Every structure is written in structure tokens, then in C-alpha cells.
Amino acid sequence: MMQRQMPALSFILLLLAIAALFSLSGNVLYQAGIFYDSPGGNPLHKIHPSFYLLLLSLASWTLYQGGVAQLYYLFTVRSHFLLLAAALCLLLHDVALGRPLSSAIVSYVSAALFLSLLKALNPGRLLQLKSLLLLLLSANALVGMYEYASGGLIAPLVLTDASSGEVI
């Protein structure tokens, strides 16, 4: 049986992906020059940075543990249904709803990648991940309470015109 311990680099990339998912909203990305929520533009900008970090985490873990054989092991151990569900959601999103695939990739494929990577964590790393999630959720709640009490926003709200993509 293959070793399932996730190396430190993969775990750090996973933690960064989770932190990015919680902290990089469309408004923050816009302020950084990434037009994530704006219509038009580069399709690679329409996929949240957390997805790229998840892919890097998976790639580093796969290469560390034995390449393609480890990737096969990761996705075949009780993951068929999860991958099939993600593929069906992508198909539904693109064909039936006529929506761009970038938002579906972030919504469905990121979740499948995240759960697949969770399977590679030992109990100690899961506790570290739990601590990070509690910290991020607490920080998010504190930011919300601060914004409510002050009546302002930490990240300025950016609204774009759907037809032209210009900032309103």
C-alpha cells in the first residue's frame, strides 16, 4: 500500500488555497488588477487563485508520492462518485444553463480537489487544518462586525457594468 502522508509543501499550498478562498473576494482581486468578477477579459483571470493553489498542492503531492500511480490511487479510492458528480455539474452548467465554465470550475472542481486532498491528511494535519478554518471563520466574523459597527468596508465595493465591463 502506498504511503498517504502529505508532504509539507503540499500541505502549505493547501493551507494557502484555503486562506485565499476566504480572503480574496472579487473586490480584493479587482483592487489587485485581477478582473475576476468583471465580464470579458482573460479566461484565466475568471478562475479563483485558490483553484490554482489546489492544483499546485495536488501536483506537488502527486510528484512527491510516486507520480501518476499516486494520482490514480488518490482518485480511485472511493472518489469515482465525487469526480462523476463534478463532471456532471460542469456539463449541466455549460450546456443546460449556458453559463461560463470558469465559475463552475471554482464551484465544483475545487470542491472535488479539496476533498481528494483531505483524504491524504493524517489526523495531526487535519487538526491543524481545523485550527486554520476556525481562525479564518473567526477573522471573517470580526471583520463583519467591524464593518457593521463602522458603517464602512475594509475592501472597497467594486461594481462593474455587465455589458461594457467598466467600473460604475
Image (spheres, rainbow, N blue to C red):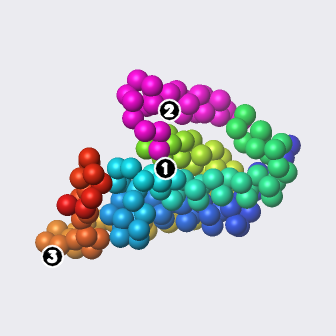
Q: CB atoms at circles 2 and 1 under 8 Å apart?
A: no
Q: Is any atom of residue 89 visible in this view? A: no
Q: How many marks?
A: 3
Question: In the image, residue 80 lies at what x, y percent?
Answer: 65, 29
Q: Which residue matches tag 2? A: 90
- From the image, state whether disc 3 or disc 1 is nearer to you: 1
Question: In the image, residue 167 lies at what x, y percent?
Answer: 25, 61
Q: Secondary structure at mark 3?
A: helix
Where residue 33 sits, quadrant-wise, is bottom left
Q: Which segment is the magenta one?
A: 77-102
Q: Is residue 138 left or right of residue 48?
A: left
Q: Amino acid at mark 3?
A: Ser
Q: Which residue matches tag 1? A: 43
Of mark 2 and mark 1, the one earlier in the sequence is 1
Question: What is the spatial separation of the Cα atoms under label 3 and label 1, in whole angstroms?
Answer: 36 Å
Q: Which residue matches tag 3? A: 150
Q: At 20% from the left edge and 61% from the top edge, which residue is drawn?
A: 168
Q: At 76% from the left edge and 44% from the top edge, which residue is drawn?
A: 71
Q: Amino acid at mark 2?
A: Leu
Question: In the image, residue 4 lies at what x, y percent?
Answer: 76, 51
Q: Secondary structure at mark 1?
A: helix
Is most of the magenta stretch helix, strand or loop? helix
